[in-house]
Amino acid sequence: QVQLVESGGGLVQAGGSLRLSCAISGPAFRYYSMDWFRQAPGKEREFVSSITYSGDTSTYADSVKGRFTISRGNAENTMYLQMNSLKSEDTAVYSCAVRSAGGEYMYWGQGTQVTVSS
């Protein structure tokens, strides 16, 4: 059974920083790409960032490019999202997901709330 648990969310002022973590249980973590998504109140879930299983390739939504950095530590079965220069529009529940080679999202975390006050 694979479980994903996010942490690191909270309340921060605009311009501040947070570091989200996604802890994954299960031996297959290092063989899959992983993504961060977010969902703001009243809005659809949107893609934030992804990272390949090797960690050598990452992609970002235009809205966070240059401010957010995704990384992963396969030894500790954890993925991270460093968020800098936060804006009020970054307020959302952030979730991590495991993606198969075929693009299917196999597992999701429960999410962690990020609130940015202006």
Image (cartoon, grey):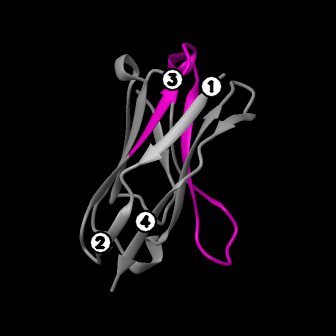
- Amino acid at circle 4: Val
User: Could you tell me how far apart the alpha carbons at marks 3 and 4 are, in whole angstroms?
Assistant: 26 Å
Q: Nearer the viewer, residue 7 or 95?
A: 7
Circles 1 and 3 in contact, beta carbons < 8 Å: no
Compute the Cα span from label 2 to label 4: 8 Å
| Of residues 49 and 18, the one drawn nearer to the viewer in this rendering | 18
Q: What are the residue bounds of the magenta stretch? A: 21-47
**Of labels 3 and 4, the one closer to you:** 4
Q: Which mark is residue 53?
A: 3
Left or right: 47 with respect to 81? Answer: right
Q: Amino acid at mark 2?
A: Val
Judged by depth in the image, the label closer to the viewer, 2 or 3, is 2
Q: Is residue 40 above or below residue 23?
A: below
Residue at x 58% of width, y 15% of height? 28
Task: Determine crowd level at label 4: few under 14, some 14-19, many 20+ residues with C-alpha closer than 10 A.
Answer: many
**Gap in Å between the C-alphas at discs 4 and 1?**
24 Å
Residue ID for mark 1: 2
Expressed as whole percent of the image width and height from the top left, the position of residue 116 reads: 37, 75
Is 114 placed left or right of 105 in the picture? left
